Amino acid sequence: MQSKILPEERAQDFRTLETISLQSQIHVIQEPTASDNTYIYAINEVAKESWEIAKQDDMVQAIVDGSKGKAVTIAAVQPTAFVSPDGKVTHSGLGQVIITTNWQAVDGRQYASAKSFSSLDGRQGQSRQQIWNVSVDLDQDKVINIQGDQERIMTETLHTNVVYGGMNMYMPDLAIAKAGSSVRWVNESNIQHNVVGSYKTEAGEEKIDSGFFKANEDWEHTFSEKGTFDYHCTIHSEEGMKGRLVIS
């Protein structure tokens, strides 16, 4: 019987291309706001066209409209633009857009604003995620397929200064820690993750990179000053694996 391997697990064996280079420049199309927690980006100009076409589709629009009040990440990740040794740029006519919605609950109630780790300690947390893969025909300017994955659910008893890493999600993804606290990220999935981001304080900005940690491993960092730490997993950012710590 053939085992089912998730795409995220295959990514662990990814090897960079050796004979050609990739043209990639992230284009941020929409930043999250207080009223609309939607982040939209494209990996290059051609992939951006994929989203411009996809957003006109009625089913895609229904998915986006039905995700109001949730954290939404829309990533235009295909086509890849290849650059040959002579500088010629080529790409396929098939685009791909990944739409991911994430939402969390604590003790059965929606959790959408940061609360202190101490107030969350011992309470039941639940994180839910839904992903849709949208295929776009760039030559015909239309969506040709929409595939929705089964909803992923992560449930944990929350503890002070601990963030759990599941399959493409952190929980809690928003939390408040006291200055001087050491916060620990625990990987409870069967794939590797990392914690990469910017720690902003009055003294300036510090770039933080945990390096990759595997299943059942953890990583810890001490936040000595008041500020904010916005972070993500670099290999699962297109699925919306991100979080924020407020250091008070």
Image (cartoon, rainbow, N blue to C red):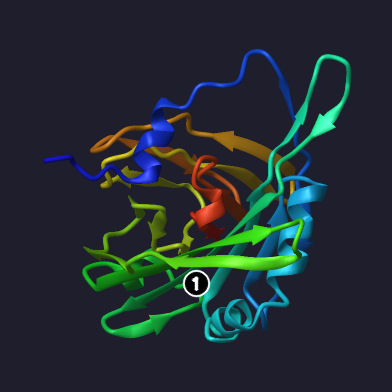
Could you tell me if residue 142 is visible in this image?
A: yes
- Along the line of sight, the residue nearer the viewer: 132 or 210: 132
Identified at 53% across, 81% down, the residue is: 67
Quarter of the image for residue 57 reads bottom right
Q: Label 1, secondary structure: give it.
A: loop
Position of residue 183 measured from the top left corner of the image (x, y, whole percent): 40, 47
Quarter of the image for residue 151 reads bottom left
Q: Quadrant of the C terminus?
A: bottom right
- In the image: residue 63, left or right of residue 28: left
Q: Quadrant of the N terminus?
A: top left
Quarter of the image for residue 135 reads bottom right
- Along the line of sight, the residue nearer the viewer: 89 or 207: 89
Position of residue 133 measured from the top left corner of the image (x, y, whole percent): 51, 61
Which residue in the structure is indicated by mark 1?
Answer: 114
Identified at 28% across, 42% down, the residue is: 5
Position of residue 74 measured from the top left corner of the image (x, y, whole percent): 62, 63
Q: Label 1 sits on what residue type?
A: Ala
Could you tell me if residue 31 is visible in this image?
A: no
- Along the line of sight, the residue nearer the viewer: 12 or 219: 12
